[in-house]
Amino acid sequence: MFGTTTIGIDLGTANILVYNKEKGIILDEPSVVAVDTRTKEVIAFGHEAKEMTGKTPANIAVIRPMREGVIADFDVTSGLLQHIMRRISAKESQLRKPNVIVSTPSGATSVERRAIHDAVQAIGAKSVVLMEEPVAAAIGADLPVEEPVANTIVDIGGGTTEIAIISYGGIVSSTSIRTGGDHIDEEIINYIRKQYNLLIGEATAERVKKELAYAPIPHEEIRTEIRGRDLVTGLPETITITSSEIQSAIEELLERVLEAIRMTLEKCPAELSGDIVDRGIVITGGGSLIKGFQEWLVSKIDVPVHMAPNPLESVAIGTGKSLGYIKAMTK
Ligand SMILES: Nc1ncnc2c1ncn2[C@@H]1O[C@H](COP(=O)(O)OP(=O)(O)OP(=O)(O)O)[C@@H](O)[C@H]1O
Ligand SMILES: [Mg+2]
């Protein structure tokens, strides 16, 4: 079934990565497309399209076709995948009809899984295998998922947080919540609007998050300037905000992630509980890069918390490496 060329795709809400065993990561772009609103043709994707966010005329729409971990706009996602295939096969002709392993969130419905399968099939893939995203994340973070021990992974992405305990190559218990980095950006936008009557864009909110967002731990306050549109005067305005403000604005959201982690650990079979105390949990995904997150989690759940070596790449690497773990896959 698996021919010479196999690629792994992490079709993430925020970022799409393609991994090939021989070459490593061969594509890493934001999950953003710019389309012509009349012809529906894809004009740009990835970094180029993300740059266009909030700045385009009416005939161009900048779209994020994946929301909350699943396909929200099927046609645009298919167009995006075709664009990606053209890009990577232009460099490597043997990538033209690859076997594809693609990750799907563990909380995806069968209809959502089917949509992901069909969109990948449509790019001319020789075969398509769907794989549980937390298993891919765990393999990519170098956890020995095949062993009879509790491998606990927490993947905080753009649209979802997936928590899973994996043993013998399969998921023993898992939780998936539709809360991730995108929702943190939304909280920041809401806070600035309520507090300062200032409307800021998604890109600004994301920048603020990366620069200033702290988990609820004591820290030395930092600040940054942001620009937006004053909702009262309608004019551009610049304000300075602090990390403490952002910290309290996003606290409730992080608590939600913590609750989901607690719930999953509580659901863990007794035989594996001891393992978690010894081996701890591994956090990955872009959301795990929130400053102080690891430290905060340790203080809340009392088990060791390790950071994956490559939080933004774990899932893609895991899909590509998973050939040795066929058992762990579901079709
Ligand atoms: N240094 C950072 N600090 C805080 N957040 C970050 C940082 N770097 C990236 N992020 C956030 O991580 C998220 C993207 O993470 P990731 O690429 O793991 O998501 P994804 O796999 O595309 O989404 P999903 O798994 O939900 O489909 C974005 O919300 C991004 O803003
Ligand atoms: Mg992800």
Image: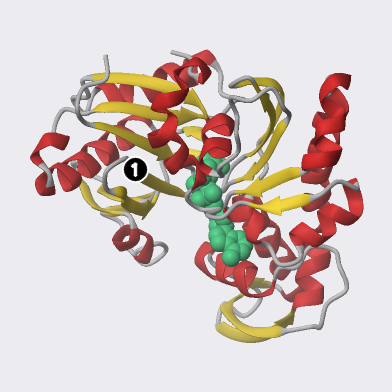
Q: Quadrant of the N terminus?
A: top left
- Locate residue 86 relative to residue 315 in the image: left or right: left
Give the labeled residue for mark 1. 19
Q: Residue at x 18, y 25 (%)?
A: 124
Compared with 16, 138 (above or below) is above
Residue 199 visible? The answer is no
Q: Quadrant of residue 218?
A: bottom right
Q: Which one is in front, 252 or 171?
A: 171
Numbered-mark total: 1
Do we see residue 225 in this rendering?
yes
Amino acid type assigned to the residue bearing label 1 in the image: Tyr
316 versus 103 height, above or below: below
Quadrant in which the C terminus is drawn: top left
Q: State the image coordinates of residue 267 (x, y, percent, origin top left).
A: 84, 23
The part of the image, by quadrant, that contains residue 95 is top left
Q: Secondary structure at mark 1?
A: strand
